[in-house]
Every structure is written in C-alpha cells, then in structure tokens.
Amino acid sequence: MKKKAAALLFVLITTIIIGILAAAILQAVLTYSQIQTLNIKKVKASYLAEAGMQYAIVQLRNKNYTSPVTWGMEEYPIHIVKENQGDGTYKITVTVQYPGV
C-alpha cells in the first residue's frame, strides 16, 4: 500500500510541476507575442510618419500645400502642420495617430 501511495504522490507532484512549467512557458510566449505586436505597430507608425513627411515635401515643392492637413488612411490619420519660420524656411510637424503605440 505504501508503494501505491508513494507512486500516486510522485505522479501528482510531477503533474503539478509540469503544469507550472507549461503555464510559465505559455506566459513567456504570450509576453513575447505582445512585444512583437507592439514593435510592428511602432514600425508601421514610423513608416506612416515618413510617408506624411514625403507627402508634405511634394506638396511644398508643388506650392499647393495648405496647413494643417490630415492625410493617410482613415484609421491611422497623419496630421501635417506647416509653420513659416519667417526667414524663407518652414517647420513641418507630422503626427501619426496609431492606436496602441
């Protein structure tokens, strides 16, 4: 009887340890996935901001740019503001509204 109880206790403890390890691995994988998703969003936001700058530069060169302007995809608008610095130069500010970043 003692052997059966010891075997049952061993199986129970082993099962608990495996369960704890599985939960820890699952948590690590989920955390890694969330970090990667955030990194992808940051890269997309950076590309959207760069696209906004390129758009503003083209509009300034064509002299048909009015400030401020909202441009881009509806769910990720790019706001571009042109400020005349008074010495023939302009300051361009690009803001991307990207949720979660």
Image (spheres, rainbow, N blue to C red):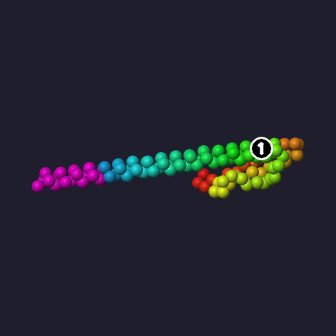
Which residue is depicted at the point 56% across and 46% down?
39
Instruction: Tell whether position 89 is magenta.
Output: no
Residue 93 appears at what percent x and percent y? 75, 48
Give the image location of residue 62, x and y in percent.
82, 44
What residue do we see at 66% from left, 54% from top?
A: 73
Q: Quadrant of the N terminus?
A: bottom left
Q: Helix, strand or loop at disc 1?
A: helix
Q: Position of residue 60 (x, y in %)?
A: 81, 45
Label 1 neighbourhood size at 10 Å, few (<14), some (14-19), many (20+)? few
State whether residue 97 appears in this view.
Answer: no
Which of the pair 31/44 is nearer the observer? Answer: 44
The amino acid pointed to by label 1 is Val
Q: Viewed as shown, does residue 29 lie left or right of 60? A: left
Looking at the image, the residue that sits furthest to the left is 1
Return the residue found at the far bottom.
74
In screen coordinates, is 58 left or right of 29?
Answer: right
Q: Residue at 29%, 53% (x, y): give it.
A: 16
Give the number of marks: 1
Tell whether 58 sits left or right of 44. Answer: right
Q: Which residue is mark 1?
A: 58
Q: Nearer the viewer, residue 65 or 4?
A: 65
**What percent of the width, then of the height, locates residue 7?**
18, 51
In the foreground, 36 or 75: 75
What span is colored magenta in the figure?
Answer: 1-17
Task: Identify the main secondary structure in magenta.
Answer: helix
Residue 2 part of the magenta-drawn span: yes
**Is residue 70 visible to us here?**
yes
